């Protein structure tokens, strides 16, 4: 019988820490999994001693993570990457020619050849299988603004020090398949099916959509209120509606405020989650986008940093199944905040148990258990 801390640990995926000792400590704490790198990069020079940019070093690193899990008799790990494709959001770009979503969108719109795209996704999924990754935080099914402008067309990646990136590609471009919804649906659902056929959990993102964001409306920095009507939002979520009818395993919720709930970002909104579950009939895994983004800090602007960590973790779990953090040093603080809340709130404890069982279910689906 797992104790409460062990159950709550399963609800987290965090970036791998920079040393083996801390990684093993997190495994002992029964963490649900790790994301290898952040975006397309190794996020610090010190971590490059653990994992590199070549195939063999990544395979060795994944094998090490799995050995630590087996050695400590823990539940097998989710091992995730950002694998959208292209120049930045593609952790495997040094060993894969998987191109940007927009490249595939343009090609498909030009020649209608879906088979080419299928082969490309299949090759990428097989590479993930070869290394041992089992979650991809992709495909992105946001439909870009008309004319391919805005946040998804060119996103500045904001970092304090360029040396923190092994390869300082600071522009992420062409993240959306298209500004045509039909293309986004066709390619997004095709990618979803192929990853799932390879026992990989694809994570469609960012619900309800980042597609209408302007160039300067970056959730990494600010909390944006989308001034869209209910009908406009319904049009933006068309890829999700189609995906849910095709047994979508997982989605990622975005840090934007919409008319579904004017008082909270979609990622933390009870009303938005109710719409997702009750109206759209989604019963898969909901992953909350990174909780250290500027949008979340702005939402909890009256709190200090530690209070934000604790409050956002509890609020996120009320309406999500997996908490994602690229700041591993905060995992224990966030986990303990959830444990504390569950110990005093029976309804929240029931939520923890329900999500824990759902995570085990999906680990069985992809043959981890």
Image: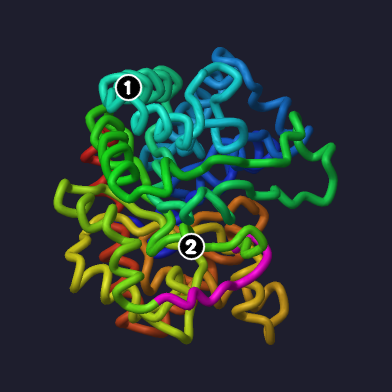
Task: Give the overall secondary structure of the magenta segment.
Answer: loop
The residue beneath circle 2 is 212
Q: Residue at the spot x=42%, y=49% of the render?
A: 179
Q: CA distance from mark 1 to mark 2?
A: 30 Å
Q: Position of residue 231 (x, y in %)?
A: 29, 74
Task: Decide: is 258 above or below 202.
Answer: below
Q: Residue at the spot x=67%, y=62% of the render?
A: 216
Task: Decide: is 60 above or below 226.
Answer: above
Answer yes or no: is residue 311 visible.
Answer: yes
Circle nearer the N terminus (1, 2): 1
Residue 156 appears left or right of 279: right
Q: Residue at the spot x=26%, y=40% of the render?
A: 186
Residue 292 appears left or right of 349: right
Task: Decide: is 303 above or below 217.
Answer: below
Secondary structure beneath dot 2 equals loop
Q: Which residues are magenta?
A: 219-228
Q: Position of residue 177 (x, y in %)?
A: 42, 41
Q: Nearer the viewer, mark 1 or mark 2?
A: 2
The quarter of the picture where the N terminus appears is: bottom left
Residue 220 magenta-highlighted: yes
Q: Closest to the observer: 24 or 183? A: 183
Q: Position of residue 89 (x, y in %)?
A: 56, 38
The residue beneath circle 1 is 122
Residue 355 appears left or right of 223: left
Mark 1 surroundings within 10 Å by alpha-carbon count, few (fewer than 14), some (14 through 19), many (20 or more): some
Answer yes or no: is residue 309 visible.
Answer: no
- Please state the total of marks drawn on the protein image: 2
């Amino acid at each position: 019988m797992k104790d409460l801390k062990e159950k709550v640990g399963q609800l987290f995926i965090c970036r791998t820490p920079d040393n083996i000792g801390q990684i093993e400590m997190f495994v002992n704490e029964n963490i649900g999994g790790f994301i290898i790198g952040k975006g397309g990069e190794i996020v610090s020079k010190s971590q490059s001693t653990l994992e590199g940019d070549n195939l063999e070093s990544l395979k060795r690193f994944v094998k090490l993570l799995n050995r630590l899990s087996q050695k400590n008799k823990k539940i097998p790990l989710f091992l995730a990457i950002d694998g959208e494709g292209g120049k930045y959001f593609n952790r495997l770009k040094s060993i894969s020619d998987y191109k940007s979503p927009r490249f595939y969108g343009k090609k498909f719109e030009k020649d209608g050849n879906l088979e080419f795209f299928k082969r490309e996704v299949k090759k990428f999924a097989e590479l993930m299988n070869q290394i041992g990754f089992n979650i991809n935080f992709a495909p992105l099914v946001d439909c870009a603004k008309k004319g391919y402008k805005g946040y998804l067309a060119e996103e500045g990646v904001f970092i304090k020090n360029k040396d923190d990136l092994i390869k300082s590609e600071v522009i992420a471009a062409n993240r959306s398949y298209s500004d045509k919804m039909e293309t986004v649906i066709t390619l997004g659902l095709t990618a979803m099916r192929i990853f799932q056929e390879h026992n990989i959990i694809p994570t469609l993102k960012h619900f309800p959509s980042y597609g209408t964001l302007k160039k300067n409306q970056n959730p990494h920095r600010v909390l944006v209120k989308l001034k869209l009507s209910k009908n406009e939002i319904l049009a933006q979520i068309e890829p999700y509606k189609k995906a849910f009818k095709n047994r979508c395993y997982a989605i990622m919720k975005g840090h934007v405020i919409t008319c579904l709930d004017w008082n909270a970002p979609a990622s933390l909104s009870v009303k938005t989650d109710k719409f997702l579950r009750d109206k759209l009939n989604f019963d898969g895994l909901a992953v909350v986008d990174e909780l250290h983004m500027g949008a979340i800090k702005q939402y909890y602007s009256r709190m200090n940093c530690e209070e934000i960590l604790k409050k956002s973790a509890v609020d996120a779990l009320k309406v999500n199944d997996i908490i994602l953090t690229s700041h591993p040093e905060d995992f224990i603080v966030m986990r303990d905040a959830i444990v504390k809340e569950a110990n005093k709130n029976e309804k929240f404890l029931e939520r923890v148990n329900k999500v824990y069982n759902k995570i085990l279910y999906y680990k069985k689906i992809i043959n981890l258990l």
